[in-house]
């Protein structure tokens, strides 16, 4: 049984990959070593080892590769460009935060075979449907466990495989299923028989039960029965009838059932495991929000010290970090500029051992990647420590490299009363920096080029730095380059003088930066003022200077008062980035999410501390029945270790909504644990709430191990029986790991 289909293996490029090639793996100018690479028979795994090393080898799956770049398209390959011509070089870029793999082939033909071959295989894995994906998963496991590669597995091998797959099962039951699958009674299973064995093993009793509840004859769901299920359980209302027909057409594998207008159990299970059966409303995944409101009316996905891949003190500054952030949908990136030794400004974390990159290279990278995943504007937040001369060089690079992409003039030539919209600014890069004077006086040339001391703090990021440095920094009157100042239009950095001052004198294009502690204090003491301020002006929040390990603060507290640019260290995985990914997963991951209407009205009285005072206050009850888990990932690769999973649901939102509830843990079963426990919550401000599902391996002696999570906005939840497709710590998919839940949302009476 060939689960890959014969086509892809017959492809000439893929054939070269399967035959294997010697490629040079390059880590730096001095580290270039030959490795033997080949594609394994599964058409999915790339295996490599050094030519002389003993038995050690490494593998990775095509599903981990996001893209192939041709030529000198990485910092490492650019550094050895003289030594190896571009047509021999290529880079494999991985999903998530895993580093690139830079390779050099021995001939152009070989380079092309790998470049085109990997691209075809990536395309193949991306276009597989749920069933093919599951088959592929089973096939992979079969190959892993078939140690002597004879295409067969005896009971002992099967038992070992179950352990690898996270299943602890009593021997009798396993042997019973094995014997049923071993139709030829040979004492071993071939791949087709193994698939049959696996199907019996993964028989979803809890899904079968739901199916039985709605099926008249227990064999199939007629259209009206499916419609009844969609209306009563999935709360789909009017569209249920039409949807029932669409689902049968899309997911029912049996042609004869389709002709009767019926859905079998297989079709029903495939629907529940698909995107439509997932917890996330499909219509909210697309671009569905009004994009024609002022910029200040949106939450904007934002990154802090974007150039760092690791920590703030000795990390590696890298162009790759900008590419990764932009690919995650980030729309506000930060550039820390300092004078370079040869007149070329450099980007790094000042006064630390982080490495330096050229400002002009950052801008070229920005031009190339800014609009790959979203057309909406990118804000370039400049932290400028350069002399006037090098500021002018920066201005020249910005104008020359970005050209028309850089917004340098008012959209309609008029002084704005409110900021332009993401729609109007599509495809534009906006510079956020200090400016000499305001937009009103741009035409008046008599201004001085000096910035006063109070504006000196406008970049904001001084306040968390060691005090000595900021004093010395403030002592020198800072001068601005007129050329750089002129490039600032709608994002002028200014010092914050309090909400009252802003109400009387603030201009919509003036923007202040707040450290997390300052923002937290303001949110607590003057929540409503902050919400009002953020309806007209934008605020940028950044992590405390003490977070040298690149850890993050909780962005929810800042979103609760309407702050738009809540900058996080994108390179650091964990809860805070899960929340950011969760909020921005809606609206086509475009990096802009429209704030709730009570955060867009200038006279709003909303306070996150007192949500019940809000007009139209309607709290909701959220009830989540956690039914079961499927093929949860192994945490510990140690032979023979099996997990004890529990599920925790966490709510993030206004202070009153912060809550967490968890199920008990199930001993020794990461394969198909069943909990059947219900967790209840009351949500006071649904428009701001995020729901995070976390699966952990229970450990009574130490901290539980993280296994997977999924976070989404409360407003994107689909009611009814739903699957949650889990993500790794890094935010990448880990199919086929999922949770099966039943969600109900009702008004609190």
Image (cartoon, rainbow, N blue to C red):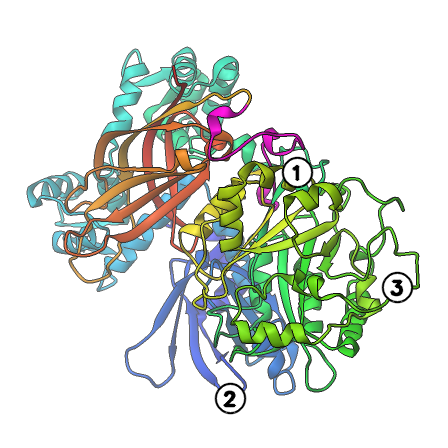
Residue beneath label 1, please? 535
| Residue at 74% over, 83% down | 343
Q: Nearer the viewer, mark 2 or mark 1?
A: 1
- Coordinates of residue 309 in the picture (x, y in percent): 50, 68
**Pick the front one: 410 or 557:** 557
Of the numbered discs in the image, which one, if any, rests on residue 30? Answer: 2
| Residue at 52% over, 65% down | 464
First in residue order: circle 2 vs circle 1: 2
Q: Residues within 10 Å of mark 1 (few under 14, many from 20)?
A: many
- Coordinates of residue 156 in the picture (x, y in percent): 12, 55
The residues colored magenta run 588-614
- Coordinates of residue 217 in the picture (x, y in percent): 28, 12
Magenta-drawn stretch contains 608 = yes
First in residue order: circle 3 vs circle 2: 2
Q: Nearer the viewer, mark 3 or mark 2?
A: 3
Q: Is residue 638 above or below residue 723?
A: below
Quadrant (top left, top right, bottom left, bottom right) of the C terminus: top left
| Residue at 64% over, 44% down | 499
Q: Secondary structure at mark 1?
A: helix
Residue beneath label 3, please? 447
**Pick the front one: 717 or 460:** 460
Q: Residues within 10 Å of mark 2 (few under 14, many from 20)?
A: few
- Coordinates of residue 720 in the picture (x, y in percent): 38, 24
């Amino acid at each position: 049984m060939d689960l890959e289909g014969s086509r892809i293996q017959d492809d000439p490029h893929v054939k070269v990959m399967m035959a294997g090639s010697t490629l040079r793996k390059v880590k730096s100018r001095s580290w270039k070593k030959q490795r033997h690479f080949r594609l394994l028979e599964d058409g999915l795994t790339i295996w490599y080892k050094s030519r002389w090393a003993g038995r050690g080898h490494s593998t990775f799956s095509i599903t981990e590769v996001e893209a192939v770049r041709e030529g000198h398209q990485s910092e490492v390959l650019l550094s050895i460009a003289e030594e190896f011509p571009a047509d021999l070089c290529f880079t494999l870029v991985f999903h998530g935060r895993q580093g690139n793999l830079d390779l050099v082939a021995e001939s152009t033909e070989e380079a092309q075979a790998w470049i085109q071959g990997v691209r075809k295989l990536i395309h193949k894995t991306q276009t597989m449907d749920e069933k093919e994906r599951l088959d592929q998963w089973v096939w992979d496991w079969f190959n892993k466990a078939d140690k002597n590669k004879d295409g067969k597995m005896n009971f002992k091998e099967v038992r070992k495989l179950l352990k690898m797959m996270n299943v602890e099962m009593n021997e009798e039951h396993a042997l019973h299923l094995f014997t049923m699958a071993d139709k030829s009674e040979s004492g071993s299973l071939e791949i087709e028989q193994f698939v049959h064995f696996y199907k019996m093993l993964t028989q979803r009793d809890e899904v079968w039960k739901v199916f039985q509840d709605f099926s008249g004859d227990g064999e199939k769901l007629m259209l009206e029965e499916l419609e009844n299920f969609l209306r009563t359980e999935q709360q789909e209302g009017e569209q249920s009838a039409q949807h029932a027909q669409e689902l049968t057409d899309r997911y029912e594998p049996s042609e004869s059932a389709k002709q009767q207008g019926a859905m079998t159990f297989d079709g029903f299970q495939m629907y529940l495991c698909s995107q439509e059966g997932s917890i996330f409303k499909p219509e909210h995944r697309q671009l569905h929000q009004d994009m024609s409101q002022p910029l200040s009316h949106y939450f904007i996905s934002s990154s802090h010290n974007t150039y760092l891949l690791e920590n703030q003190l000795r990390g590696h500054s890298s162009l790759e970090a900008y590419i990764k952030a932009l690919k995650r949908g980030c729309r506000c990136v930060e550039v820390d500029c300092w004078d370079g030794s040869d007149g070329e400004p450099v980007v790094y974390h000042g006064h630390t051992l982080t490495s330096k990159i050229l400002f002009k290279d950052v801008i070229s990278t920005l031009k190339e990647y800014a609009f790959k995943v979203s057309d909406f504007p990118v804000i370039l937040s400049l932290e400028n420590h350069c002399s006037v001369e090098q500021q002018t060089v920066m201005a020249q690079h910005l104008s020359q490299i970005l050209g028309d992409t850089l917004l340098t003039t008012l959209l309609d030539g008029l002084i704005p009363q409110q900021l332009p919209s993401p729609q109007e600014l599509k495809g534009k890069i906006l510079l956020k920096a200090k400016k000499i004077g305001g937009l009103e006086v741009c035409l008046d040339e008599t201004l001085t080029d000096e910035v006063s001391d109070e504006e000196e703090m406008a970049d904001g990021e001084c306040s968390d730095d060691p005090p000595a440095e900021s004093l010395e920094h403030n002592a020198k009157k800072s001068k601005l380059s007129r050329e750089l100042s002129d490039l600032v239009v709608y994002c002028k950095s200014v010092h914050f003088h309090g909400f009252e001052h802003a109400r009387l004198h603030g201009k919509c294009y003036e923007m202040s930066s707040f450290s997390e502690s300052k923002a937290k204090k303001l949110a607590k003491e003057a929540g409503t003022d902050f919400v009002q301020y953020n309806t007209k002006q934008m605020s940028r929040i950044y992590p405390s200077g003490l977070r040298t390990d690149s850890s993050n603060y909780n962005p929810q507290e800042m979103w609760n008062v309407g702050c738009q640019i809540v900058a996080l260290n994108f390179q650091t995985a964990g809860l805070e980035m899960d929340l950011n990914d969760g909020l921005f997963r809606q609206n086509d991951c475009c990096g802009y999410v429209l704030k709730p209407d009570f955060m867009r009205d200038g006279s709003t009285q909303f306070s996150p501390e007192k949500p019940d005072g809000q007009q139209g206050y309607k709290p909701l009850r959220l009830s989540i029945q956690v039914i079961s888990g499927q093929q949860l990932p192994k945490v510990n690769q140690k032979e023979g270790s099996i997990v004890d999973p529990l599920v925790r649901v966490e709510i993030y939102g206004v202070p009153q909504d912060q809550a967490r509830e968890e199920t008990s843990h199930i001993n020794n079963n990461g394969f198909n644990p069943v909990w059947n426990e219900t967790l209840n919550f009351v949500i006071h401000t649904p428009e701001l709430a995020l729901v995070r599902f976390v699966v952990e391996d229970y450990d009574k002696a130490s901290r539980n191990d993280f296994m997977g999570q999924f976070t989404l906005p409360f407003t994107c939840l689909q009611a009814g029986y739903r699957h949650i497709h889990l993500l790794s710590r890094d935010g990448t998919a880990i199919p086929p790991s999922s949770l099966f839940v039943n969600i109900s949302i009702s008004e609190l009476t």
